[in-house]
Amino acid sequence: MAEVINMPRLSDTMEEGTVAKWLKSVGDKVEEGDILAEIETDKATMEFESFHEGTLLHIGIKEGEGAPVDSLLAIIGEEGEDISALLNGGPSIPEDSAPAVEETTEEKQTTSAAPSAEIPEGVEIITMPRLSDTMEEGTVASWLKKVGDTVEEGDILAEIETDKATMEFESFYSGTLLHIGIKEGEGAPVDSLLAIIGPDGTDTDAVLKAHTGGGASLESAPTAIDEKVETPKEEIKTESAPQIQVDGQRIFASPLAKKIASEKGIDLSQVNGSGDHGRIVKRDVENFKPSEQKATPTVAAPETAMTAPVVPIQLPVGEESSEEVKNSQMRKIIAKRLAESKFTAPHYYLTIEVDMANAKASRVQINDLPDTKVSFNDMVLKACAMALKKHPQVNTSWNGDTTKYNHHVHMGVAVAVDEGLVVPVLKFADQMTLTQIGALVKDLAGRARNKKIKPDEMEGSTFTVSNLGMFGILEFTSIINQPNSAILSVGAIVDKPVVRNGEIVAGSTMKITLACDHRTVDGATGAQFLQTLRAYLENPVTMLA
C-alpha cells in the first residue's frame, strides 16, 4: 500500500521547508534508511531519510521549492500502483480494504457524540524538538523554568541532551509555563509533549485532552503545589546530594557541577555561578574555596581498665558509599557508535616519531608576526589536510559494496566537553591557511564547550585528528570516527637526545599514531600517508608554498 511522506518538522521552530536536493528520482527503489532528500530548515540543511520501503512513485515538491510542514513531499509504494486517489486528496487506504458503509456511519455517530475539544486561543503546545538530523530521542538535562513561571520569548526553558550535544532550548512564545511533560533526567522521542505555555489560569487538563484526543490525564502532571511537595523528596535521596533549593529559590547548576559538588561535599548555595543567567558550571565548583572548613569530629579512645597507658591504634573511620549516575544521551550515543566502529571496522595501528625541531622554530617565527597565533595542533591539521590530497585512499568511507572516495577534505577535530566528546568539522581544510585553521578551531571548540555549536558544524568529516599532547600523553591509539577510514592520534612533544648527522644532540620529537580501517586502507597506504605527513611537519615551509 502506498505511503504518503509529508514535509517533516526538523526543528522546533520550523514552519516551512525547502528541498535543497533530491537524492532519489521517481521510479527509484527506496530502502528503509535511504536518504530521500536534503531539506533546508530555518536552522540548517539536513538529510531526510525514508522510513518506508518501495518505489518512489511521486515527488510533490521540486528542488529549490519550499512548502509548509506536513505538505505532500513524496509517495512511496509498489511499482505501477495507482496513486491518483492520494494525489486528489483521497484516502490512502485502497477501496477494496476500506471499511463498510455501516462501520463508517457508526464511526461518524460515535465521533459526533463525543464532545469536540479544541486547544484554547493563546495556548502553545511545545514538543520535544529534533535538534540534530540523527536525533530520535532527547533527554531533559535541566529545567530553567518551573510550572507557574512567566516565560518571555527568547527565555531558556530547558537544557536538552541530544545524541551529539547538550543544547539550550529557548521559548518562542510568551506566557505562563502551565505544564511540564518530561521531567529532569527523563528522555522521550522527538515530538513528545515537552511543555505547555499559555495564559495564567488556563485549564491544562482540558488542553491535554484536546491535544491527545481526550485520552490524557493530569494525574501525574506537575503543578505549582506538587513541585513544592516533591522537591524535598529529591533532596533527601542521599546525604551527599547537592542542594537545589535555598529558601524556596532554585539554584541553577549543570549536572556535572552538581556531581562534582556532591563528590567534594560542596554546598552549591555558597558557590557563585559564572554561566548564563548566573548558572553554576564545572569551573565554578572546581575553583570554589570555602571561607572556613567544618571541623572533623574526633573519635574518642575507648576507656580501659589497665593502669598502663595504651596508645590506641588509629584505624580509618568512614562509611562506604557509591552512587549510580544516569548516562546522558550524548554518553549513550558515544558508547554505541564507538562500539560499532571498534567491532565492525578491522582496526590496525601505525606509529612514527617526528622530529619537531624545525616546527618549533617555524612556529616562533610565525607567531612573531602581528595578530598571528598558530599552535602545533594547527600545523598537524594543515599537514594532514595536504597529505590526504596526495593519498586519497585514506580519505574514504566503506559502504559495503562500494568505497566512497571523498574529493573534499573535511577535517574533524576531537574536543573534550563536560558531557563527553564532540567532533567539530573544519570544512575544506586543505584550502585554509594555518592562521585560518587556528582561528576556526578556537571558535568551534569554544562554542562546543559553551553548548553554542550548531549540529551541522559537527557533521561531514572525512578524517579526524585527536590530540592529547597538551595533557602530557606521549603515545596513544584512537577508535575510528566512522564513516571515516582513519584517525590520527597526536602525542606530546618531548625534548630528548637524538642522533643527527651521526652525533647525539638535543632534539624534540613527537609520536603520532594512525588508526586505519583495513577494509579501505592497506598497511602500505597508511605508511605512505605517514611518510608524507612527516615530511610536511619536519619541513613546515613546504606547507606555506
Image (tube, grey):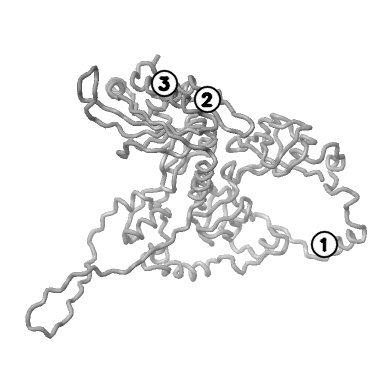
Q: Which residue lies furthest to the left in this view?
A: 308
* Cβ atoms at labels 2 and 1 below 8 Å apart: no
* Cβ atoms at labels 1 and 3 below 8 Å apart: no
For residue 366, above or below residue 248: above
Q: How far apart are marks 1 and 3 (CA)?
A: 73 Å
Q: How far apart are marks 2 and 1 (CA)?
A: 63 Å
How packed mark 1 is, by other alpha carbons closer than 10 Å (few <14, some 14-19, many 20 or more), is few
Where's the C terminus, which quadrant? top left
- Please report whichever mark, 2 or 1, sits nearer to the chain's N-terminal start: 1
Q: Quadrant of residue 113?
A: bottom right
Q: Is residue 475 visible?
A: yes
How packed mark 3 is, by other alpha carbons closer than 10 Å (few <14, some 14-19, many 20 or more), is some
- For this rendering, which residue is in front, 207 or 510? 510
- For this rendering, which residue is in front, 491 or 36? 491
For residue 93, above or below residue 180: above
Measuring 47% from the left and 28% from the top, which residue is drawn there?
A: 523
Q: Position of residue 168 (x, y in %)?
A: 50, 47
Measuring 83% from the left and 37% from the top, which residue is drawn there?
A: 79
Q: Say which residue label 3 marks.
A: 532
The residue type indicated by label 1 comes to: Thr
Q: Position of residue 447 (x, y in %)?
A: 44, 39
Q: Say which residue label 2 marks.
A: 393
Q: Position of residue 519 (x, y in %)?
A: 54, 32
Q: Nearer the viewer, mark 2 or mark 1?
A: 2
Q: Say which residue label 1 marks.
A: 111
Q: Position of residue 107 (x, y in %)?
A: 85, 61
Measuring 67% from the left and 30% from the top, which residue is drawn there?
A: 21
